[in-house]
Image (spheres, helix red, strand yellow):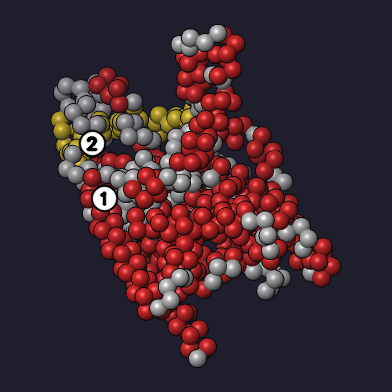
């Protein structure tokens, strides 16, 4: 009977993981509706490394990748290279690794829950929710740094919690957590804090490891030093500082707000400085951001405000999960606050410390309710929902009632997921294609087909960094691009700008009406925003967003 029960559980887990993969790979090349500028940047630079051994800037990124001046971490580049070599430089080629990691995280979540000691059924339900919840599903269908850290942190914690089963799991946990800090900026804050907490929490165990499993212990410690010691000079470097200026709560806008508040205050100057200053501004916004991630509005009803990271007006979890999430949260918090906390239940403290620390990186950045920046907390919300659900079912004396309630809950999740997916693959794709910079691919294909007919091609910068879309969709030979005598790029106002290469000239949208193509032997092509062009040009084509509104006008002279 035990064998049959185990087989049924394995089949159920397999079906849940399969569901996770299907939901992530289905129509991956067309949903989201197009590649955004971060995706093409990572894709083309991975392609450049594959072809030439360096990125478009002639570097091999290790600590940070320059990109446009926002300095993302380089793990995405190297993750994409094998996929691009197999599938080519296209939507599927650069998104497939992220969909793969998303599916594998469903499996990692199950073992993580077992390590936390919450039981098989909690693990299966949590994995099912990771497979199907908007917060875990939506980002895993496009290129974003947090997908890598989400998988590595989940897997690393699962390996750590199972370290007693196989000694090699401890070094592997160190490897996964170490690599995670080179995948996503927020992991560089959260993971070191978590590691320090784990070292303190399990301090009585390390002497035994030193005595009985010294090789694995030294290996794990060495890996951690190799990965984490370089973070000190990296964090103090100019690139990390530039990144911090982009996302910090205390940015120039915050400083201006503090100055204006002091100037408009009726308080005495001393009190005004005491009330309106950087520390008070930081703390007030930090707590508002931090607590906002626990609000029903963000979690279950409205989600974040970034159209690229969630379906507008939809929570990052399904509404039916709400009571069980807060019940699970209560179980976790009150379980850890009990005075008579048994030492063998330290895994509950792991989850509690994870919850406390994981949202700090998101809370110290500007803006609230940021879906991607808060992914360091995943998959803990799904685990809390599963924990709360089975705690709710526990008092049912009649097993059939518990089973019926479970069936109803799963049915409700499927019904909500079906509604969500119909929007995601339907109206969201149509109505928000503009937020994915739709139209660049079609514009570049038109230019490529007619490239030899023109001496000069002028391209608007209205939708952001057109040169990168040209490089990606052509695709342009990376070595030829880096050596192009017409390549004009420079650093200004914290950003790397490209104004021209080959026949292309990239112009600010407000300057388009001043462009000239006067020489009689020069034929020009203009790709501009709708209706924004000088007199005397002939319109050749209009490229529309998926909702039918114009994205680009293409003209010649």
Quarter-wise, where is residue 459 in the image? top left
| Neighbours of disc 2 within 10 Å: few (<14), some (14-19), many (20+) | many
- Residue 386, x across and y down, in percent: 46, 64
- The answer to which of 354 and 554 lies nearer the viewer is 354
The quarter of the rendered structure image containing the C terminus is: top left
Instruction: Using the image, determine if residue 130 lies above or below residue 476.
Output: below
Instruction: Using the image, determine if residue 272 lies above or below residue 460.
Output: above
Q: Which mark is residue 552?
A: 2
List the residue tagged with mark 1. 429
Q: Which mark is residue 316?
A: none
- The answer to which of 64 and 319 lies nearer the viewer is 319
Tag 2 secondary structure: strand
- The answer to which of 261 and 378 lies nearer the viewer is 261
- Residue 253, x across and y down, in percent: 47, 23
Instruction: Using the image, determine if residue 343 lies above or below residue 468.
Output: below
Furthest toward the bottom, the residue is 1
- Write the residue at 51% across / 40% down: 290
- Write the residue at 30% across / 21% down: 511
- Write the residue at 70% across / 44% down: 230
Q: Nearer the viewer, mark 2 or mark 1?
A: 1
- Residue 61, x across and y down, in percent: 58, 45
Q: Earlier in the sequence, mark 2 or mark 1?
A: 1
Q: How far apart in space, not on screen, are marks 2 and 1 (Cα)?
A: 18 Å
Tag 1 secondary structure: helix
Q: Is residue 393 left or right of residue 420?
A: right
- Residue 331, x across and y down, in percent: 53, 58
Q: Is residue 94 visible?
A: no
- Write the residue at 68% across / 51% down: 197
């Amino acid at each position: 009977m035990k064998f049959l029960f185990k087989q049924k559980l394995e089949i159920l887990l397999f079906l849940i993981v399969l569901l996770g993969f299907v939901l992530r790979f289905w129509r991956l090349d067309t949903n989201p509706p197009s590649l955004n500028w971060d995706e093409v940047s990572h894709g083309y630079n991975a392609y450049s490394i594959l072809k030439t051994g360096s990125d478009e800037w002639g570097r091999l990124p290790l600590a940070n990748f320059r990109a446009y001046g926002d300095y993302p971490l380089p793990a995405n580049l190297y993750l994409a290279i094998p996929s691009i070599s197999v599938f080519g430089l296209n939507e599927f080629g650069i998104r497939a690794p992220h969909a793969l990691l998303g599916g594998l995280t469903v499996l990692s979540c199950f073992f993580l829950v077992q390590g936390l000691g919450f039981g098989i059924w909690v693990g299966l339900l949590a994995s099912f929710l990771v497979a199907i919840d908007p917060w875990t599903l939506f980002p895993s269908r496009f290129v974003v740094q947090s997908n890598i850290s989400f998988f590595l942190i989940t897997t690393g914690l699962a390996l750590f919690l199972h370290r007693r089963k196989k000694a090699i799991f401890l070094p592997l946990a160190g490897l996964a957590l170490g690599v995670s800090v080179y995948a996503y900026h927020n992991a560089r804050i959260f993971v070191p804090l978590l590691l320090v907490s784990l070292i303190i929490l399990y301090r009585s165990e390390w002497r035994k490891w030193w005595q009985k499993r010294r090789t694995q212990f030294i290996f794990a410690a060495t890996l951690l030093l190799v990965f984490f010691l370089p973070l000190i000079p990296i964090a103090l470097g100019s690139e990390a500082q530039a990144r911090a200026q982009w996302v910090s709560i205390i940015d120039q806008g915050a400083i201006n707000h503090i100055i204006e508040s002091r100037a408009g205050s009726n308080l005495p100057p001393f009190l005004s400085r005491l009330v309106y200053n950087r520390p008070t501004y930081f703390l007030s916004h930090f707590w508002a951001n931090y607590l906002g991630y626990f609000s029903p509005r963000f979690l279950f009803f409205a989600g974040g405000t970034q159209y690229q990271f969630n379906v507008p007006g939809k929570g990052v979890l399904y509404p039916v999960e709400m009571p069980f999430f807060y019940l699970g949260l209560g179980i976790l918090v009150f379980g850890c606050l009990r005075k008579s906390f048994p030492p063998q239940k330290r895994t509950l403290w792991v989850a509690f410390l994870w919850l406390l620390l994981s949202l700090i990186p998101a809370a110290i950045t500007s803006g609230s309710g940021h879906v991607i920046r808060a992914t360091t907390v995943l998959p803990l919300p799904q685990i809390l929902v599963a924990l709360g659900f089975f705690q709710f079912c526990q008092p049912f004396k009649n097993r059939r009632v518990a089973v019926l309630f479970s069936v109803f809950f799963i049915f409700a999740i499927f019904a909500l997921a079906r509604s969500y997916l119909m929007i995601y693959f339907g109206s969201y794709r149509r109505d928000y294609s503009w937020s994915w910079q739709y139209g660049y691919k079609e514009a570049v294909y038109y230019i490529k087909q007619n490239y030899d007919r023109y001496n000069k091609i002028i391209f608007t910068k209205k939708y952001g960094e057109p040169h990168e879309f040209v490089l990606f969709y052509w695709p342009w030979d990376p070595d030829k691009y880096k050596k192009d005598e017409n390549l004009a790029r420079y650093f200004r106002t914290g950003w790397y700008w490209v104004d021209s290469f080959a026949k292309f000239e990239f112009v600010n949208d407000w300057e388009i009406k001043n462009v000239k193509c006067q020489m009689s032997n020069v034929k020009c092509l203009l790709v501009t925003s709708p209706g924004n062009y000088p007199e005397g040009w002939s319109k050749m084509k209009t490229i529309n967003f998926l909702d039918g509104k114009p994205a680009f006008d293409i003209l010649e002279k």
